[in-house]
Amino acid sequence: MTRRPPSRQPRRGAASRRSNPGRPSKSATETQRKHMQPQKTAIVVLGAPNDAAGRLSAMAVARCRQALCEFARHPDACILPTGGWGAHFNTTDKPHGYYTRRFLQQQGIPPDRFLECAESSNTIQDAELSRPIIARHGITAIIVVTSDFHLPRAQFLFQRAFPGMELAFSAARTDLPAAELARLQAHETRALAALTQTFKS
């Protein structure tokens, strides 16, 4: 006669564990909720020279127009202008970012789309002073707008300043005489090499 194996009773708690099949853990639910939150983008417009009357240079206008193109693609984005004061780009009584904002508002960007200005004096400060503003407003993605010749240095500094942040870079075309453009490109090459060496040591 074949002996039937004894029936196995479910362990205590087993039924309750199976009563909600596929239920995500708390950590999984929090991760899903985080990914479901709408992305909040900031377009960071890096500063360029203006004159003693606050008129933007051709380079600054080109960056502003590139920012307008990005805003057209991302109409829910915020605008963060950079630029304070410096002998080489702004000697007026207002920060350079004020003139950037004024120009962009004149082109139709609503006043409530602007974040505070990062009152920087150079590209290193552009990235550093943007950080608390970006954090304060819960920004999750950044589009950095600058000139084409300046892009590699801006990219290097913003990637260091915002590790883990979703970053994109948008280059404004620089229309200058060949000799002047070559001078700017040579300056950027030297500046980037110096930064690379500084952060390596």
Image (cartoon, helix red, strand yellow):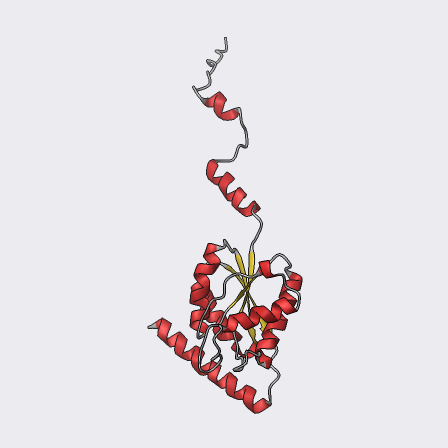
State how many labels appear. Answer: 0
Quadrant position of the C terminus in the picture:
bottom left
**Looking at the image, which residue sits at the far bottom?**
179
Picture quadrant where residue 69 is located: bottom right
Near-viewer residue (131 or 117) = 117
Position of 190 with respect to 66 (left or right) is: left
Picture coordinates of residue 127, whole percent (x, y): 45, 67
Picture coordinates of residue 181, whole percent (x, y): 56, 86
- The vertical placement of 51 against 199, above or below, is below
Near-viewer residue (190 or 66) = 66
**Looking at the image, which residue sits at the far top?**
1
Res 109 visible: yes
Position of 117 with respect to 199 (left or right) is: right
Image point 50% across, 55% down: which residue?
A: 137
Image point 57% across, 53% down: which residue?
A: 39
- The vertical placement of 10 against 141, above or below, is above
Position of 25 with respect to 106 (left or right) is: left
Picture coordinates of residue 163, whole percent (x, y): 45, 60
Res 163 visible: no
Picture quadrant where residue 78 is located: bottom right
Picture coordinates of residue 66, whole percent (x, y): 62, 71
